[in-house]
Image (cartoon, rainbow, N blue to C red):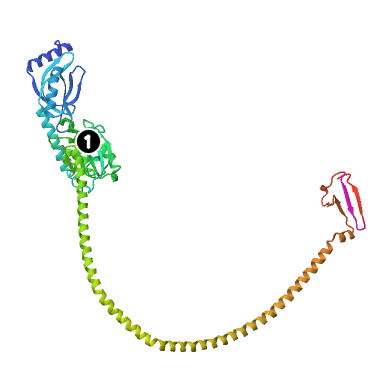
Amino acid sequence: MASKEILSLFQLNQQIKDVLTENFVAPIWVRAEIAEFRENRNGHCYLDLIEKSDSNDQIVARAKAIIWSYTYRMLKPYFETSTGRSLNSGLKVMVQVQIEFQEVYGLSLIIRDIDPTYTLGDLEQRKREVIQRLHKEGVFDMNRELNFPTVPQHIAIISSPTAAGHGDFINQLEHNSYGIKFYHHLFPAIMQGDQASESIAKAFDAIYEHLPFFDLVVIIRGGGATLDLLCFDDYWLAYHITQFPIPVITGIGHERDQSVADLVAHKALKTPTAVAEFLISKTVEFLERINQYADLLLEWTDNELQSRKHYLLSVVNSFSPKVQLLLQQKKFQVERIENTLPLKTKRLLQSQNVEINRLASDLNRISQRKINTGLSGLLEKKKHLMLLSLTLLKQQNKQLRFYEKSNRLNDPIELLNRGYTLTYSGGKLIKDGQMLAEGQCIETRFRDGRVDSVVKRT
C-alpha cells in the first residue's frame, strides 16, 4: 500500500495562505450585507459580512472583516457624509478588501475602501419597494383620504420628550397670537435608530386606546442628519400611519427628500414649527369663516329688520281707517241694542216671573209631600225604637238579676255563714301557704268571731 501524505494543521493552513497570497495579490471589490458591526475601544471596527439567497433569504456565504482604526477614521465620515447614515447592521455595502489568511485566526477580509453610492442605491431601492408594496396592498392613500377636522384642537403627539422640536412645537401652539387654546398629550417614542419604528408603532397603539379624545396625530422631531430619518422609511411604521383612523401629520425635520412616512401621512411638513403654524392656520380659517358668517348674519338681520319696519309702517298706516270703520260699525250695533234692550228686558223679566211662580208652586207642593212622607216614616221608626228599647231593658234587667245573685253567692259573709274561714296576716288575706312563715302572727275569722294565732310550722 502506497504511503499517505500527512500534513499538520499548520502546514495545511500555510499552504492555503500561499494559494490565497498568490491568487489575490491586489485588493478586490466585494458586495455583501453587514450582519454584525462593532467598534472596540482601540478604534478598530469588526464586521460580520453575509450574503443571502434571493429566492429564500437564506445565508449562502459568511466572512469576517476588519477595518483598522487608521482606515476607519477616514472611511466613517466619508460614508456618513455621502449616505446620510452611519455604518451599521442591516446595510448592504460594496467594500474593497485585501484577503488575508493567518494560520491561527483563519481567513479575514481587511477593508481598505467603501463605495457609498452602492449603499445609497440599495436604500433607495428599499424605499421604492416599500412604496410599491403599500400601493399594491391598496393602503397608500388611506390616511390622506380621511376628512381633516374643522377645528384641530385635540392633538396626540408622538415625539421624544427631550427633543428640541417637541418644545418648539408646544411653544408655538401655546403662544399663538390669536389666543387659540389647543389640548395636546405626548406619547413618548424613540425617534431615531433601529428601535425607532417599533417604538413609534407602539405609540400609535397607545393613542388608539384613547382615540375619541383626539382630532389628529402629529409625529415631530428636531433637525438632524439624514441618517437619523431612515426609520421613517420602514414598512410597518408607514403601514400603521395608513391604517390609523384619524389624520396623521409629520414634521420630522428633513430638508430634502420625503420619507415614506411623509408620503402616506395626511399632511407632511418640514419642521415641528411648521406643523404648529399649519394647525393654527386651519383653526384661524375656521374662526374667519365664523366671523364671515356673523357679518352675513348681521347684514341679513339688518335688511330683514328694515323690511319688517317698512311693512309695519304700512300696516300702521292702513290700520287707523280700518279701526275707525270698525268702531263706527260697533257703535251702530250698540245703539241698536240699546233701543231694543228695555223691551227685551221687560219681556225676559215677565217670562222669568211666570217661571218663578210656577217653580214656587211646584216647590211648595213637593215640600208638603216630602214632609208628609217623612212624618209617616218618623212614626214608624218611633214605634220600632220603643219596641227595641223594651226588649233591651228586659235583657238588661235579666242580666242585672244574674249579677246580683252571683255577687250574693260570692259575698265573704255568705261564705263564712256556710262554714268557711278567712285567714289574714298584717291585714292581708292569705291565699297561699307560702305567704306564711314560722312565728308569724295570723288572724282567722269565723261567722261569729275570730281567733289570733301564731304559726309554729309550715
Q: Quadrant of the C terminus?
A: top right
Q: Secondary structure at mark 1?
A: helix
Residue 326, quarter of picture? bottom left
Q: Disc 1 marks which residue? A: 168
Q: Is residue 38 above or below residue 298?
A: above
Residue 455 horizontal/vertical position (percent): 88, 46
* Of 335 and 219, the residue lying toward us: 335
Residue 136 horizontal/vertical position (percent): 15, 43
Residue 242 horizontal/vertical position (percent): 20, 42
Q: Is residue 397 visible?
A: yes
* Of 25 and 196, the residue lying toward us: 196
Span colored in magenta? 439-448
Residue 217, quarter of picture? top left
Q: Is residue 67 above or below residue 426?
A: above
Counting the numbered discs, the total is: 1
Q: Quadrant of the N terminus?
A: top left
